[in-house]
Amino acid sequence: METYGPYDPTVDYVPGPAPRPKHGRDGETSSWRPLHMSRRNFLRGVVCSGVVIGGSAYLFSATTPARADTRAVERLVRLTVNGRTHSVEVAPNETLATTLRYRLGLTGTKIGCNQGECGACTVIADGTTIYSCSTLTHRVRDSEITTVEGIAGEDGTLHPVQQAFIEEIGPQCGFCTPGQVVSAVALLNRNPNPTIEEARLAMSGNLCRCGAYDHYLRGVMKAAERV
Amino acid sequence: MAYKLIGKNFIPPDIEAKVTGAADYAEDFRADGMAHVKFYGSPMPHGRVNSIDLSEAEKIPGFLAALLPEEVKQPDSPVGFPILTSEPTYFGQPILAIAAETEQAAADAIAAVRMDMELLPFVTDPLESLQPDGPNALDGLNVAGSDIDAQELKWSGRDFALADENALPRGEAPVEWSFGDVEAGFANSAVIVEESFVHASNAHHAMEPRSAAAYWEGGKCHVWGSTQSTAFAQPGLANLIGIELSDLVLVSEFCGGGFGGKGTTYPLMALPAVVSRKLNGRPCLLRVTRNEEYNNGSARAGFQGWAKLGFSQEGRMLAADIYVVQDLGPTSGFPDFNNVGSAAVIVFQPEAARFRATPVLTNTVPKGPQRGPGENQAANMLEPLLDKAARELGIDRLALRLANAPGGGVGAKYGHEQGPVTSAYLREALEMGAEAFNWTERSKQSGMRNGSKVRGYGIGEAYHTAGSNGFDGLVRITPDGALHVHTGVGNLGTFSYASTSRIAAEALGYEWDHVVLEYGGTTKHVPWNLGQFGSNTNFTMARTNYVAAMDAAQKLKEIAAATLGGSAEDYELKDERVVKTGDESAGMSFAEAAQKAIEMGGRYDGHEIPDDIHPMTQASASAIAGTGLVGVAKDNLPKDATVPALAAAFIEVDVDVETGKFEILDYHCVADCGTVIHPMGLAAQVRGGAMMGFGLATSERHVYDPQYGRPNAQALYQAKPKTYLDMPAQMNWAAVDQPDTQSPMGTKGIGEPLEGAASSALICAISDALGGHLFNRTPVVTDMILNAAEGRPQSHKPLATNTV
């Protein structure tokens, strides 16, 4: 007889309750309701009202008597995402994917593997694509971050890459698509006229289990004609 | 027949959300005060929990609750699939779950759990379990499977001794069938090929792990889950949670990949719901990690097999004798084994055949259906044997396939009962593909050397059943004139939830921009549909949407007759109006008819519904009753034959005999999918299925440490799906485009054979480049190619599985 510890103890975590506006709790009853506010509107609201997005104000205080994170002291940092600067509390070991998804409500960035293998979490930091699942938020606090939510125009006009991906039916299940979009946009930002081989290399950090590479690549080349 | 919508490209309504990041998957669920759930996965492949000490875990700040195995419903069967268990039968199986305020706190609490476990006997190689004194994966049980009683089955020492070295021993088989005179077939054969082989298991590895969220409100359980089957998954999920179907609200607008692994209900989808119940309904999110997804995310079943195939001088298959041992995993798994036999019969049409199978329990990842379950392994295992036979007969590999492939529509034989099919055009697919690929001329370059590279060519064929029947359709015309097609098909990424909805629009003569698709969850009031799996949707739900549309059409005519006089037979549908035949000025718009339907009530607006529809459809129809003209019906259309989806693929490769790497230069696939419903969608499936097939053929496999039973290839890089860099320069496709005889508009499915045709073609091409060397093992990995090129022995034992 032996005693075993857990096989996968503390890796791969995200912090708790989401920073969505508190309009889902029904004051009249004690029931819970999921929130369906669009991210765009939410972020606009937060930015305009100057509310600090962070753990102490909203994330933990409503339901947590003590700070839940047992190992890390969070620090308030300023993070520039999609052209807007947010004040956000971040744990020292927190990844950018976590901060985006669980503190800023930017769930377009997906966590497919959380270990730098798949590219679903790809974002742009100062013009360069990075895996946000494998980047500490503190490392990019002075960077300009662009996520898939920041690719379309303010008025919702799709980026040529997004439009071309739709026309070529690039996405299948769609889970890798945000990363594919971001990688393609970053490529065209630095090289508006890539050869197909250059495009293939630039996109090669983004896995697609549906295998839709050919259609994404057609989309990239079509978008290159339009940017 | 000329259609307005069928066979035309369109933009599926969900695709924009996918490119903007607005598409919400299960892990994107957020609610105020949401708790996070993590589970303790078994650290051993088979064990028993003696005691659990939560005292330290409960001290973790933010700890909310723990859920133990005794608190959840356990399956009735020893080979069932529990949510939590105190006797884990595979590595990583959930034993207990903890909810906490944050995921970090939940993870810390899991780390603080002290678990006293004892290791039980385990096995990762099916043949080892069949040895006279071999270990059992479960206590006293080592054989199970669909329609097979769970039992202990050991082969005798004699069974093992009788087999030649490196050949599959063939002891007692729980599954056996035959037709024709097999021995006479072999006696008459000019060439007999006899080989043993291994096909590895491999992970589904959908990009979206099976995360889920849940909360309870007003006595109902709300689940955000990832499923291929919005309707079909619900009864099983309700059962796992322990509630009535009517008390379940399932939201699953997007599914980030399934490939069969999310086709039906799975335990992890229920876990946050049962934890939430313990927290009085508080929202709970379970984020499943990539490693957890590997361990619990289903896998394709592997095989150890043997086949003896006899051919006439012309290449006709006179007899086939096939035996497979399936790696079932620790549950009843999926009957891939049956599909190996049925695939061989439909693709090769042998004049006589015997098939035997023994599915064996192992302490490996639970197996589920993965794209072409059994059929695609059959293609990979058997297609190279056709090449060997052609070489020995001195005939072209295409000619041998043409001599056997079913064609001409109906007339092919299916299964051991040699039953009929609704349509089969594999021969035509081969002919079309060979012409487009220029097979006859190009394949003469086989073996051509350029430096260290050698040219190779391959042909692959594959099959899957492509349709079922007996499900329900539900459509609604609202007073604004719009057609709402309610569909319980999941949104897997094939867009067939949308393309099959176009059947209803086509039948009613609608413009596509006047159609609203109601999909993605219970709240959309979906009918009882079969899941988005098994290549069935384009047949099964073409029929349900057609019968619902026909019901709506009849009601439109009756309403017009009641309003304008005459009888329903006097009216026809034209341009979204119901008009008198011969006098189009007498009529009413669909919008007016919908308004009238509400006034007339009864069966016209859904207040009276047919008796034979499923309770789910009844509930959905009742929910929308009074909002418009409701068309609702069960698919009672005739179906008396098997629906085959078939595909043929041609491939050109360069194999570098100094590095073992290969490059795919050209790929061409022809699909027999009935009437093409959505060309762009089909193109995406052809190419995507091929990429998945290339991984299946050459890089994806399970690897276990046999000493400790631990999986050694959990990560994507260890069993790598193909990437942009592996993509062929050319990926062309075509469809036979002949209508199926039992589908209202001729459509049938195709998703699965598109993978098996590609994978088997690639294996054949690599073999061809190496002078016809048979690997008899899938995947054909780089070191195997190098060893073959160098004439060195392979590093694996011929029948070993779940190893490197």
Image (cartoon, coloured by chain):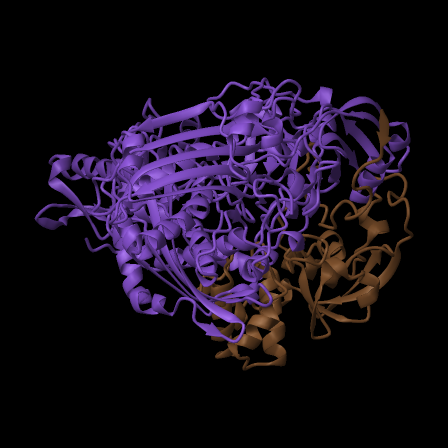
Chain colours: A brown, B purple
Between B294 and A27, the one lying in front of the other is B294
Query: Where is residue B276 drawn, in percent x and y?
Result: 70, 31
| Rendered position, A85 above or below B236 | below
Residue most extreme to the left: B582
Q: Quadrant of the N terminus of chain A?
A: top right
Q: Is residue B614 visible?
A: no
Between B116 and B453, the one lying in front of the other is B453
Query: Where is residue A162 drawn, in percent x and y?
Result: 53, 67
Image quarter for residue B730?
bottom left
Between B779 and B727, the one lying in front of the other is B779
| Rendered position, B305 above or below A42 | above
Image quarter for residue B594?
top left
| Rendered position, B11 above or below B559 | below
Q: Is residue A204 visible?
A: yes
Q: Residue at x 11, y 39 (%)?
A: B570
| Rendered position, B777 above or below B660 | above
Relative side of B231 to B724, left or right: left
Query: Where is residue A40 drawn, in percent x and y?
Result: 64, 59
Image quarter for residue A145?
bottom right
Query: Where is residue B696 drawn, in percent x and y?
Result: 52, 51
Relative side of B233 to B286, left or right: left
Q: Residue at x 74, y 51 (%)?
A: A102
